[in-house]
Amino acid sequence: MAGDATPTTAAPARVYGLTLDAVDNLPPIVDALQSLPKRPWVRIVFDYPRPASDYVSAVAAIAPFAEVVGQPADSTYCALMTVDQYRARFASYVATLPQIAIWETCNECNGDWLGPNASAQADAATDVVKAAGKKALFTPYWNTPTCADKNGPYLAWLTAHVSAKVRTGSDYVMPSIYGSDCDGPEPSYAELDAIIASMTALFPHALVGIGEYGKQGNAAILQYYMSYQNASPRYIFAGLYWYGTQDLVPKSQPLWQVFASLMR
């Protein structure tokens, strides 16, 4: 079965991640990261249309204490770029920030707000990332039939629109899951099991996990996802908690202690 295929990336130990949507104030960011009990993944949102050169110092400061995941194009900005502009932006970022090993090729790719070029943009970014010998992270946007946007249920869209190149070439696949933006509650653990099983089947060589999640200031949601376990040998979690800048920096923030205590 495709879901049982051996991943091309050797499965690491369970990893824990967070997102930084601003890196202007580096000292408390670095302090918060280096004080965690385990080395995290840290996804940095590179604001459009800022160039890669704006982030050289920040990445250099953060990289010693985290596995940096680069996001050159948040889903909010994808519709503002042609496919060629998207490709060029990735090429510039990957070349300028060579210490970043993992690049997010398409963020919340099935969302209708990305416009009509999302699939082609994912192809272009995957070409750039793989040609540079880097790892590709693909991020779907989870929904249910009752809260789907104009692009419809996410699994149907992914099956119909994501190319074989992206499906077989992605090293990591981690859907954004925001229950509070959908029907209300977060998906049950049984529903999360089904989501992960679907991702392993659709992306046969990828390690899988949970991408964006969270609600600002909500410790219960943080604990809910960080406590979830999955038996798949390809599940690594990562969990790129969206409100890292707001809730986990500085380390005096109450949720920093929650995050740190759940790293195990």
Image (cartoon, grey):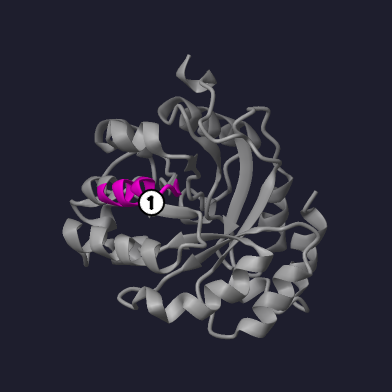
Q: Is residue 178 left or right of residue 138?
A: right
Q: Position of residue 260 (x, y in %)?
A: 78, 61
Tell which residue pokes out farthest to the top in this image: 1
Is residue 145 in view? no
Which region shows up in magenta? 124-136
- The residue closer to the viewer here, 35 or 150, is 35
Is residue 116 in view? yes
Q: Residue at x 77, y 73 (%)?
A: 254
Q: Is residue 126 magenta?
A: yes
The quadrant in which residue 244 appears is bottom right
Q: Residue at x 34, y 38 (%)?
A: 166
- The residue closer to the viewer here, 203 or 92, is 92
Q: Is residue 257 left or right of residue 224?
A: right
Q: Is residue 164 depicted above or below 76 in this figure?
A: above
Q: Residue at x 52, y 55 (%)?
A: 212
Q: Is residue 240 magenta?
A: no
- The residue closer to the viewer here, 49 or 95, is 95
Q: Position of residue 222 (x, y in %)?
A: 68, 57
Q: Is residue 87 left or right of residue 227?
A: left
The quadrant in which residue 29 appears is bottom right
Q: Position of residue 198 (x, y in %)?
A: 47, 29
Count of picture labels: 1
Q: Position of residue 234 (x, y in %)?
A: 59, 31
Q: Is residue 143 depicted above or below 46 in this figure?
A: above
Q: Which residue is mark 1?
A: 132
Q: Amino acid at mark 1?
A: Ala
